[in-house]
């Protein structure tokens, strides 16, 4: 909730500046656009954009946070960096902003974690996540002008990669037969 509250403060400041800070978003294949990897998730086009992101960000972020603060931070940074690099390399020439890539990343992480971990708890969280937010997977395809489907796609892929990496670290090493 603290993160989402911070986004609202940033949106208020950005709105008072006529959204001038949105130029700090990801601008593909331009060196200055790389800074957007760090800033894009914090910037939104307007209050409606942020309002649409706030509830799923809070719910899915909380579900990831249930695994611990360290996991939450590692997963969040991994998603932001990997999805940001994907958008920077392959996105349309436009500023890409918003927390949607992070949201799709959390979704991908939670669902893939259930697949890779195969524990009852992870499977239950994956089923609940898919039931509540499965429809947003369609946003990884180009459908609405002005919506960064690239952020959605690379966010989802980054979340799956974070789940895979996390379960590989957590998997017990098998003992060698002597």
Image: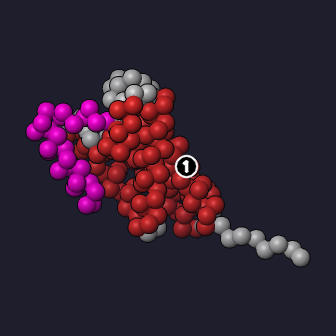
Magenta residues span 1-25
Residue at x-position 45% and y-position 46%: 81
The residue nearer to you, when weighing 35 against 156, is 35
Residue at x-position 61% and y-position 67%: 170
In terms of secondary structure, what is the magenta stretch mainly? helix
- The location of residue 55, given as percent across then percent down, is 30, 51
Q: Is residue 67 visible?
A: yes
| Residue beneath disc 1 | 160
Residue 48, compared with residue 80, is above or below; it is above
Report the side of 5 relative to 116 (left or right): left
Q: Quadrant of the N terminus?
A: bottom left
Residue at x-position 39% and y-position 31%: 31
Secondary structure of the residue carrying numbered label 1: helix
Q: Quadrant of the C terminus?
A: bottom right
Q: How many marks?
A: 1
Report the side of 15 relative to 92 (left or right): left
Q: Quadrant of residue 76?
A: bottom left
**Residue at the bottom extreme of this rendering:** 178
**Residue at the left extreme of this rendering:** 16
Report the side of 17 relative to 93 (left or right): left
**Residue at the front extreme of this rendering:** 31
- The location of residue 94, given as percent across then percent down, is 35, 25
- The location of residue 39, given as percent across then percent down, is 31, 43
Q: Is residue 107 visible?
A: no
- The location of residue 12, given as percent across then percent down, is 14, 45
């Amino acid at each position: 909730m603290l993160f989402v509250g911070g986004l609202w403060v940033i949106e208020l400041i950005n709105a008072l500046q006529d959204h001038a800070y949105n130029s700090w978003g990801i601008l593909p294949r331009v060196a200055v656009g790389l800074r957007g990897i760090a800033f894009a998730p914090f910037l939104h086009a307007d209050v409606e954009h942020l309002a649409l992101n706030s509830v799923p960000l809070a719910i899915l972020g909380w579900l990831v946070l249930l695994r611990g603060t360290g996991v939450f931070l590692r997963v969040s940074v991994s998603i932001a960096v990997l999805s940001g690099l994907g958008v920077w390399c392959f996105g349309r020439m436009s500023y890409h902003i918003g927390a949607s890539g992070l949201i799709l990343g959390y979704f991908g992480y939670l669902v893939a974690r259930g697949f890779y971990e195969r524990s009852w708890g992870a499977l239950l969280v994956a089923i609940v996540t898919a039931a509540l937010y499965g429809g947003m997977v369609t946003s990884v395809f180009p459908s609405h002008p002005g919506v960064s489907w690239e952020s959605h796609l690379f966010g989802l892929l980054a979340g799956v990669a974070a789940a895979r990496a996390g379960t590989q670290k957590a998997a017990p090493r098998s003992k060698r037969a002597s």
